[in-house]
Image: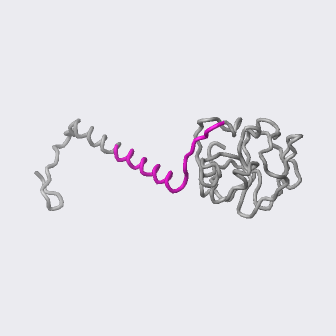
Amino acid sequence: MRVANEFRVTLPAEGARPRPCRRFLRMAYDMAEIIATAICLLALTLCFLCRTSRVEGHSMNPTLRDGQFLLMSAYSGPLRHGDIAVVSGDGSGLGKTIVKRVIGLPGDVIDIDFGEGVVYRNGEPLREPYTAAPTTTSLGMSFPLTVEPGKCFLMGDNRNHSTDSRSPQVGQVDQRDVMRVIFPK
């Protein structure tokens, strides 16, 4: 025995190898520590920075499919035209979470020509390559309408099979109830 730092420590003989069992246990402990750290970081990220949701239905076809998972962020800055957004069940007016596209923001004037299937924002026709078909279905709202302060106007990409802001049941949605989808874009 040799003395190290004033404590008695048994040191292995020079050239001796550590026993395989201890090496395996040390490696298993290190791996468990790495995995636990990764799980904690993932949990913190999902709790405080972003959320996940799942698409239910076909209102966002062809952009999103039924059953597809989404990653959303409440801290990704203000909404922009064309963003895909998830609205909480309380904010949707339908009692369930919905996924739609941002068409209008506060102050925008939205008009829809259901005969031609064209959506206008501030007098300009929208170029919408993401839609499944022209917008020919009216859901009861009167157009043109001006988006109120703090609200947004949302529509599904599968316009003729989507309950969205064209419906009085949903109407203009409070932006505080909306989270922007960050994946997939």
Decide which of 155, 82 is in the foreground and name it: 155
* x 16%, y 43%: residue: 13
* x 69%, y 46%: residue: 100
* x 76%, y 50%: residue: 103
Residue 64, percent from left and from top: 66, 38
* x 70%, y 50%: residue: 169
Residue 167, percent from left and from top: 74, 48
Decide which of 119, 96 is in the foreground and name it: 96
Magenta residues? 32-57
Q: Quadrant of the C terminus?
A: top right
Q: Is residue 41 magenta?
A: yes
Q: Which quadrant of the figure has residue 16?
A: top left
Instruction: Examine the rendered structure and indicate whether residue 49 appears above or below residue 66.
Output: below
- Residue 147 is left or right of residue 122, and the answer is left
Q: Is residue 147 magenta?
A: no
Decide which of 173, 106 is in the foreground and name it: 173
Residue farthest along the left direction in this orientation: 1
